[in-house]
């Protein structure tokens, strides 16, 4: 019996979220008193796979397949290995891939599934997990009663615990796949910090006034090594691309630090940011609801405050 | 071509969530019900596609799993422009239960494309669309932010981590859609509301399906401590606090 963790790579490299997932799997396996298996699909070098040993990975299965598999094929590979390793729990990240594939894996394994789980289970027998519902307005405890369970883990909810282990890499035989969906072209967002991976996020709302005013916001993001984001009206207006839209109907983010600049703090926006560790709000209206969600607030006009804030962080970063 | 749009009946996004005194259930008294925001966009896009090419798309059906009190939400879908509707007479328990009911309800119908929202704003399960595709053994594309149909080829854009992909899929397929699929949700016209009353709303009985997960308790999220206000003239203080107190930079 085991815990099976499916991990993704980007151009053959792992991100912090991957190590978090592996560390989670390792602690979950320990709680259950079973072994841990990791599945990596794509071309990842031995050294990179071995780096997972720092967080408790010991047995890594590599399928050096092309990553442009369709969802059905992905699910069949993951559930195949789950069956072969007698997985009791299959763990994936709660990201675009997890959302697409975990439900299919659950059906194949006749497993109960809970998505966006927060941290380790509260109990393992019965198996009870925590998650948010009503877009962050409520916390629920859910029992999964099936013999096999599939869960997707919310990013930044489990932390990382080092547990050095030796890694054995085992190559899985190639599979022949007849994809039902075809990728015609891929457009990669280049150079910038990805919103889904960022530790710091600088987000602008309608209070930024116009798309031209994003330059100082981007400067702040640059100084902090942050990803940029925005509220829904900003992306609806086309001031910023859709993939930056944060909130109930956009992305849910959980960085260490979230800057809400000229964002009023509507409940639908808060739904996307409430898991952030620290929220800083800048708004000229002291009554803006964002201040009830923020840890630190500055009351003032962004035209004036934003450049000064960037200067202050520059100074801090350069150590004076 | 026939399109099915899966609709979840959810509390308005501004609803304050209350619980029964034992914290085991949500107290839905006084709640305003709406079409789940992503489902509303999916429905909007289906209607746009049909309007653009009525010769190709014959029918749009809206389906929900819910008791009779979900019917106003289905009627709204009809008023927006769906041609008919199906209600599976059951209360959802978990994603598997809901997906099983949907699968059963459409087994004798012939749909070419099923659109589902990427999650519902109540239990945020993000699973029904994928489960439905697997139960039907159909291909699926998730995180879809645009759909166009050319002959029998369905071209979609999907978001991937750090970019997007243009994809092609055939029929039948399940498309699990998110933001971008349509800009503004359709609002029913007066005429739409009138004709919705005469459109068919079929009620299908539930089938046996064992839910595999159950909510045990609800709780309110922990309260935030009060916001520290920093003088706009002293932003070095903000930088200092984030560095030494919050330790996030
Ligand atoms: C079903 C549904 C789903 C939704 N989903 C989302 C979602 O996912 N994400 C989302 O963000 N919204 C969402 N919304 C919209 C949400 O209700 C709000 O309308 C939106 O978040 C407001 O965006 P905003 O804060 O940028 O703009 P506003 O509410 O207009 O706020 C602008 C703020 O900027 C301040 N301001 C103005 N000028 C300055 C200045 N010079 N200096 C400093 N401050 C200034 C103002 O005081 C104000 O507080 C949704 C709504 C619905 C109905």
Image (cartoon, rainbow, N blue to C red):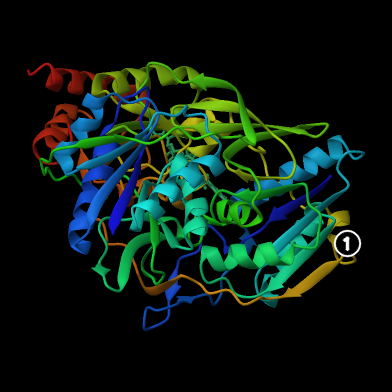
Whether residue B30 appears in this view of the structure is: yes
Label 1 resides on the chain identified as: B
In the image, residue B89 above or below residue B171? below
Q: Residue furthest right?
A: B55
Residue A113, percent from left and from top: 44, 60
- Residue at 56% in and 35% down: A177
- Residue at 25% in and 58% down: A120
- Would you say A246 lies left or right of B89 here? left
Residue receiving disc 1: B194
Near-viewer residue (A90 or A160): A90
- Residue at 66% in and 37% down: B183
Q: Residue furthest bottom?
A: B22
Please state, as top left, top right, bottom left or bottom right, where the C terminus of chain B lies in the image: top left
- Local packing at callout 1 (Cα closer than 10 Å; few below 14, some 14-19, many 20+) is few
Q: Quadrant of residue B51?
A: top right
- Residue at 72% in and 61% down: B63
Element type at mark 1: helix
Q: Quadrant of residue A20?
A: top left
Q: Count the marks: how many?
A: 1
In the image, residue B226 above or below residue B206? above
Residue A132, percent from left and from top: 38, 59
Residue B69, percent from left and from top: 67, 75
In the image, residue A3 above or below residue B172? below
In the image, residue A148 above or below residue A285? below
Near-viewer residue (A300 or A257): A257
Q: Residue furthest front?
A: A173
């Amino acid at each position: 019996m085991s815990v099976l963790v499916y991990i993704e790579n980007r151009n053959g490299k792992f991100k912090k979220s991957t190590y978090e997932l592996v560390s989670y799997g390792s602690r979950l396996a320990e709680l259950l008193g079973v072994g841990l298996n990791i599945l990596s699909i794509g071309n990842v070098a031995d050294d990179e796979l071995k780096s997972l040993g720092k967080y408790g990975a010991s047995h890594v299965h590599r399928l050096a397949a092309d990553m442009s598999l369709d969802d059905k094929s992905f699910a069949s590979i993951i559930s195949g290995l789950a069956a072969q390793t007698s997985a009791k729990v299959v763990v994936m990240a709660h990201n675009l891939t997890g959302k697409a594939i975990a439900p299919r894996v659950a059906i194949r394994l006749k497993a109960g599934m809970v998505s966006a789980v927060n941290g380790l289970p509260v109990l393992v027998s019965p198996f009870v997990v925590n998650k948010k519902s009503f877009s962050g307005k409520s916390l629920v405890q859910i029992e999964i009663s099936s013999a096999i369970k599939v869960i997707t883990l919310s990013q930044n909810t489990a932390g990382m615990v080092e547990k050095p282990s030796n890694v054995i890499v085992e190559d899985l035989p190639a599979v022949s796949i007849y994809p039902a969906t075809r990728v015609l072209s891929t457009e990669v967002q280049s150079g910038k910090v990805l919103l889904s991976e960022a530790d710091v996020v600088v987000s602008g709302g309608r209070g930024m006034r116009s798309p031209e005013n994003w330059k100082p916001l981007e400067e702040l993001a640059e100084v902090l090594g942050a990803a940029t984001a925005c509220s829904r009206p900003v992306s609806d207006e086309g001031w910023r691309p859709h993939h930056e839209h944060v909130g109930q109907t956009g992305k849910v983010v959980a960085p260490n630090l979230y800057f809400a600049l000229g964002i009023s703090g509507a409940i639908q926006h808060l739904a996307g940011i409430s898991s952030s560790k620290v929220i800083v709000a800048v708004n000229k209206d002291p009554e803006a609801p964002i201040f009830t969600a923020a840890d630190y607030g500055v009351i003032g006009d962004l035209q004036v405050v934003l450049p000064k804030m960037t200067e202050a962080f520059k100074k801090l970063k350069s150590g004076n | 071509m026939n399109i099915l749009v899966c609709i979840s009946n959810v509390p308005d996004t501004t609803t304050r969530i209350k619980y029964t005194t034992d914290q085991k259930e949500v107290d839905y008294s006084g709640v305003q019900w709406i079409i789940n925001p992503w489902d509303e966009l999916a429905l909007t896009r289906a209607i746009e596609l049909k309007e653009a090419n009525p010769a190709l798309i014959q029918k749009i059906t809206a389906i929900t799993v819910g008791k009779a009190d979900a019917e106003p939400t289905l009627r709204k879908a009809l008023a927006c422009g769906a041609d008919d509707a199906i209600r599976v007479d059951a209360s959802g328990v978990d994603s598997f239960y809901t997906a099983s009911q949907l699968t059963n309800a459409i087994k004798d119908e012939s749909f070419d494309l099923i659109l589902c929202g990427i999650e519902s704003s109540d239990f945020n399960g993000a699973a029904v669309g994928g489960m439905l595709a697997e139960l039907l053994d159909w291909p699926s594309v998730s995180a879809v932010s645009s759909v166009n149909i050319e002959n029998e080829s369905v071209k979609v854009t999907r978001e991937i981590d750090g970019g997007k992909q243009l994809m092609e899929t055939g029929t039948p397929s399940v498309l699990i859609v998110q933001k971008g699929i349509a800009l503004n949700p359709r609002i029913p016209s007066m005429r739409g509301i009138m004709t919705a009353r005469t459109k068919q709303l079929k009620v299908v009985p539930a089938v046996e399906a064992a839910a595999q997960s159950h909510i045990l308790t609800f709780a309110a999220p922990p309260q935030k401590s009060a916001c520290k206000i920093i003088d706009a003239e002293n932003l070095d203080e903000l930088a200092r606090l984030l560095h030494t107190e919050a330790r996030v930079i």
